[in-house]
Amino acid sequence: MTVRVGVIGTGMIGQDHIRRLTDVIAGARVSAVTDLDADRAAEVAARVGATAHPDGAELIASPEVDAVLVTSWGPTHAEHVLNAIAAGRPVFCEKPLATTAEDCLRIVEAERAHGRRLVQVGFMRRFDAGYRQMKEVLASGSLGTPLMVHCAHRNPTVPDSYTSRMAAQDTAVHEIDVLRWLLDDEIVSAQVITPRATSKRFAHLKDPQIMLFETANGVRVDLEVFVNCQYGYDIRCETVGEEGLVRLPDPAAVGVRTAGLHSTAVPQDWKARFVDAFDTEFREWIATVENGTEPTGPSAWDGYAATVITDAAVASLDSDGAVVTVDMKPRPACYGGAA
Ligand SMILES: NC(=O)C1=CN([C@@H]2O[C@H](COP(=O)(O)OP(=O)(O)OC[C@H]3O[C@@H](n4cnc5c(N)ncnc54)[C@H](O)[C@@H]3O)[C@@H](O)[C@H]2O)C=CC1
Ligand SMILES: O=C1[C@@H](O)[C@H](O)[C@@H](O)[C@H](O)[C@H]1O
């Protein structure tokens, strides 16, 4: 069976995922698209042989669609995901699941009422080979009990439209998700402090930021978010246990020796850094749709958890670095054990 995917939002990542579903992933094709920009949707539809629909609701209701991919702007995600659940369609939603905790909970409730998981959230790091190896090492117990995690998330530059809150909402949200999964533990508090600001930023932005998280088991996490670091897109993660540590590898790149220097390239953006993770994420999601099984990637509950932890980090930033307790509802049994 070829899974027919309908895509809501044909902007930057929407087009990248359409390319992936068309050229890379076997057993899938894009059958329908929609965008607020109708010309853009029509152009993409013509390129991949899909039907352009006037809006998300019509696309979801179309008999040509087996599964839905939501790659529109964050504040619109909840409406499309809720419509997909109401229609009983599997739905992959790029992060964030929704921009408010209340909307995330509405999705969790709708999915619970439907009786089986339909939603997967686009936290692609769980599909990255390096993070997967880290998780295996941690789960093996060979490092003893994990105590601390040191992380960095650096982007070369960000546009003027990027705000100080987006450091948590848009950027650190990936670490928030992957750390809950890596440690199989829940984040219970957040604190954001701001060191000296880089001169290479737009004046309104607090950059860099240092985020500190604590988990239910007492693991302490420090995360540097530095979105104007200039030199590249650099993702670092090191977990220290009682008997050793495990560190995320740098992506494979050839070593070049010339003019007295040995160098390796640093990726320049998240697309290049996580290209394999995105491919694996979609390969595994399409396989579950094809087999009629529940998705195995980040759930609606994980999307909710990421949003409430992000809210705590933003509250800390807004209150000059206070430690803010994460206000998370009890996890429903249908979403399994710890993160
Ligand atoms: N997993 C990851 O690493 C990344 C995830 N994202 C997420 O993907 C989403 C989209 O981001 P970008 O592609 O960068 O944005 P974009 O602005 O390039 O594209 C969004 C598109 O959605 C359309 N759109 C907005 N609301 C719509 C609606 N209700 N119905 C139909 N079309 C609608 C817009 O017209 C636009 O063409 C965001 O939620 C973002 O956080 C973005 C970049 C990386
Ligand atoms: O999701 C993403 C962007 O929206 C965000 O702005 C970047 O910092 C992240 O690394 C990328 O994965």
Image (tube, rainbow, N blue to C red):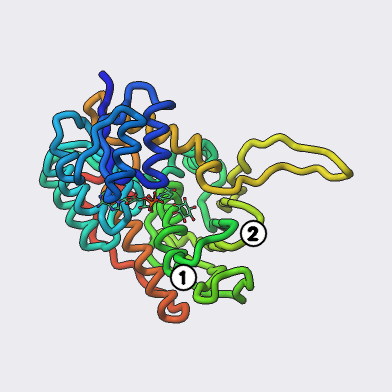
Q: Is residue 304 left or right of residue 217?
A: left
Residue under the image location 45 percent in, 47 percent down:
182
Task: Indicate the amino acid at tag 1.
Answer: Ser
In this rendering, is residue 210 above or below 87? below
Q: Residue furthest bottom?
A: 320
Answer with left or right where residue 153 lies relative to residue 30: right
Specify whether residue 241 is in view: no
According to the picture, the residue beneath numbered tag 1 turns out to be 164
Q: Residue 223: percent from the left, percent from the top? A: 53, 61
| 320 or 282, nearer to the observer | 282
Quadrant housing residue 208: bottom right
Q: Which mark is residue 230?
A: 2
Residue 229 in percent (x, y) is at 62, 61
The answer to which image quadrant residue 298 occupies is top left
Quadrant showing the N terminus: top left
**Is residue 194 visible in this depiction of the protein?**
yes
Three-letter residue code for mark 2: Gln
From what the image shows, is residue 72 above or below residue 20?
below
State the separation of the CA atoms marked 1 and 2.
18 Å
